[in-house]
Each structure stands twice: as C-alpha cells, then as structure tokens.
Amino acid sequence: MKSDRELDLVCIIDGKFVIGEAKINVDQIGRGDIEDLAQTAIELKADVAILAALSGDLAKMERKVNDLRKLIVGKDIVARGLISDWNDEPSSYL
C-alpha cells in the first residue's frame, strides 16, 4: 500500500486516540494540511485532531481550528489547537 499522508503526532492520551499536524509557525499550517488531517482523523476514527505550532498568533490558530472543525462536524472528533508557550531558544518541543 502506498502512503499518501503523514502525521506529526500519533498517541493515546487518557484512552483517547490523538493525531495531529505540527509546524514551526501557525502561518505554515495550510489549507491542505487541515484537509489532510480532517480526512485522516475520519478514516482512522481518531478521538482528537490537533493543529500545533511552536509559535504564532493565537487568533490565526483559532481560525484554522475552526476550519478543521467544519470538516469533521458530526464525526465525534474533537479539534484542538496548540501553540507552544516555551520561551527558550530554539526548542523542538511543543
């Protein structure tokens, strides 16, 4: 089977199957990333779909999360956004 998508985050948290897309900055999360995450969350029956970034504007992230929510409406999947609050230079951790 040929792979056509990749995930940056795949884990189980408190019994919930969580998947996500992560970028350095919120501005780098594109429409295609959101659509791919939504489709993958639906196909894999994820409980939570997360958009994550190390930096960026919280209002922009909320708009992107709302776009994700529109694509998974009625699928019993929770959409969340996460922006790192670390102030250290540079960090690979969210």
Image (cartoon, rainbow, N blue to C red):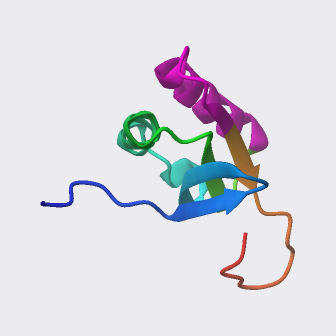
Name of the residue lying farthest toward the left: 1
Q: Quadrant of residue 37?
A: top left
The residue at 86%/64% (across/down) is: 85
The C terminus, quarter of image: bottom right
Name of the residue lying farthest toward the top: 74
In the drawing, does residue 34 fall left or right of residue 81? left
Q: Is residue 33 or residue 73 the one in the foreground? A: 73
In the rendered image, residue 78, in percent from the top left (x then y), is placed at 67, 32
Name of the residue lying farthest toward the front: 15
Residue 24 shows in this picture: no
Residue 75 in magenta stretch: yes
Q: Is residue 46 or residue 21 the one in the foreground? A: 46
The residue at 74%/57% (across/down) is: 13
In the drawing, does residue 12 fall left or right of residue 36? right
Magenta span: predominant SS is helix
In the drawing, does residue 10 fall left or right of residue 58? left
The N terminus, quarter of image: bottom left
In the rendered image, residue 53, in percent from the top left (x then y), is placed at 64, 58
In the drawing, does residue 80 fall left or right of residue 1? right
Residue 35 shows in this picture: yes
Residue 53 in magenta stretch: no
In the rendered image, residue 48, in percent from the top left (x then y), is placed at 63, 42
Q: Quadrant of residue 35?
A: top left
- The vertical placement of 69 against 45, above or below, is above
**Total residue callouts:** 0
Q: Is residue 62 or residue 74 the one in the foreground? A: 74
- The vertical placement of 87 against 8, above or below, is below
The residue at 41%/36% (across/down) is: 31
The residue at 55%/14% (across/down) is: 74
Q: Is residue 13 or residue 39 the one in the foreground? A: 13
Instruction: Report the span colored magenta.
Output: 58-79
